[in-house]
Image (cartoon, helix red, strand yellow):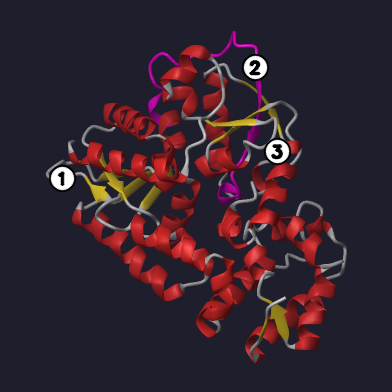
Amino acid sequence: MDSIKLSKEMLERANIIYSECIGCKKCMKNCIMLDSYCASPKELFGGIIKSCEIDIKIPYSCNLCNLCSEVCPKNIDQKDLFLELRRYAFKNNKKAIKPLGYKVVKFHQENSFSKLFSTTMKKTESVSNIAFIPGCSLMSYSPEIVMKTYEYLQSVVPGIKIILKCCASPTHTIGDQQGFKVYYSQLESEIEKLKVTEIITACPNCFISIKKNSPNLKITTVWEKIIEKGIPKGLLNKYSKVDVKFTLHDPCPTRYEDNVHDAVRRIIKKMGITIDEFEFSKRQTVCCGAGAMVGVTNSKLSTAHMNKRAGEATSEHILTYCQTCAESLSIGEKNAVHLLDLMFNEEMCSTFIFKQEKNKFATKWINRYNGKRKIEKL
C-alpha cells in the first residue's frame, strides 16, 4: 500500500461523507471498488480521517461513474471527492501516481493531440456551423464506420464539418487540471476556427466533456440527430427477422441523459433489433469497468468489473453505443458490439455475425492515422 498524507481541507471533505453516511451500503451493491476496499463507506472515510492519509490506489480505482450518488438515500457524492483526491495526489505527490500507469495516459494524450493523429477538415468555407466529433475510441476501432457516419450526417446536415481531436477526458480523470486546460483549449481553438456553434458526438465521454466545458455550444448526439432526421437508408426493420437478441448497455456518462436513452431505443426499435434490458440500466446503469482510466490505473479490478457487468447480460450478445464499453464487455463468452456496427459495418450487416474484431494496440493507432488521412482528403 502506497499511502499519501492528506491536507486539512481533504480531511474535512472526507468527514462530511463520514458524518452523512448512514451505512446502508446501497452504493456497494454494484461497486466492486468499494467492496474491495471497505465494509462500508462510513468505515472507509472514518479510517481515512483517523489516519490522515489514504491508499493512493483507492481514488484511482473509482470509475467516477456516479452510481453511488444515484442510489444513495442521502445524496452523498463520493465521486466528486474521489476526483478531488486524484487532483490532490497529482498536484502534491505525482511520484505516487507513476506506478498506476500515468505514463500510459500521458502517451495517449500527447499522441491524441499530435498532428500525426488529429486534424480538422481543410475546407472551412462551408455555411454550416455544425461539426461532428467522432471520438478517439471509435476512430481507433474503425475509420470506415466513422466516415460512413459522417457521410450520413452530411446527407441530412449539408455542409457539416468534422473534427478529429480528443476531448482530453483521460487527462481530466487522471487529475491533471492544468494539463486538461491546455489540451482542451486546443479543441476549443479548432471549434472557434471553424466557427462552429453546434457539436454532434458519437462518444459519450466527448459529449459530457464538451457539455461541461463549453456551455456556449449546443451539444447533441448522433442518436438524437438520427431520430430528428430519420434513420439511414436501408435500415428500417433490417434486423426484424434476425434471430439474435442483444442486452442493451447504457454507458455511464449518459446516466442523466434521458433524451439519449430514448433516442437509442427508438432507433433500435425502428431497425427491428430485439433487445433485453440489463437489470440496472439508464439512470442506474453500471459502468463497463473502464471508466476514468481504471483499466490502466487498476487493471485487475477493472477486469473484474468488466466480467461482472458482462455476466449480468441475459444474452450472449451485448449492444451498446460506446466503443470503449463494447471493447470492455467483450469478455469471455460475451460479444459486445456498437450500434453503429449494425448500421455501417458492412461485414456485420451482411453476415449477421455480431462480433467485433479485437484490434491490437498498434492497429488502433494505425486506424487513427488512416482516419486522419481520410478527413484531410475531404
Q: Residue at x 77, y 51 (%)?
A: 30
Mark 2 is surrounded, within 10 Å at the Cα level, by few (under 14), some (14 to 19) or many (20 or more) other residues, namely some
Q: Which residue is mark 3?
A: 310
Above or below 64: residue 360: above
Residue 183 point in image, percent of width and height: 35, 65
Bounds of the magenta segment: 228-255
Q: Type of residue at label 2?
A: Val
Above or below 367: residue 46: below
Earlier along the polypeptide chain: callout 1 or callout 2?
A: 1
Give 25 or 104, whichever is nearer the viewer: 104
Q: Residue at x 49, y 23 (%)?
A: 342
Earlier along the polypeptide chain: callout 3 or callout 2?
A: 2
Label 1 close to label 2 by CB (< 8 Å): no
Q: Is residue 59 left or right of residue 131?
A: right
Residue 89 visible (yes or no): yes
Q: Type of residue at label 1?
A: Lys
Q: Which residue is mark 2?
A: 244
Q: Locate the C terminus and report the quarter of the image it occupies.
A: top left
Q: Type of residue at label 3?
A: Ala
Q: Residue at x 55, y 83 (%)?
A: 93
Q: Locate the N terminus and report the quarter of the image it occupies.
A: bottom right
Residue 96 point in image, percent of width and height: 59, 78
Q: Is residue 339 left or right of residue 27?
A: left
Q: Main secondary structure of the magenta part?
A: loop
Residue that extends furthest to the top in the rendered view of this protein: 241
The image quarter containing residue 226 is top left
Above or below 345: residue 241: above
Instruction: Please name which of the two marks, 1 or 3, marks the residue nearer to the observer.
Output: 3
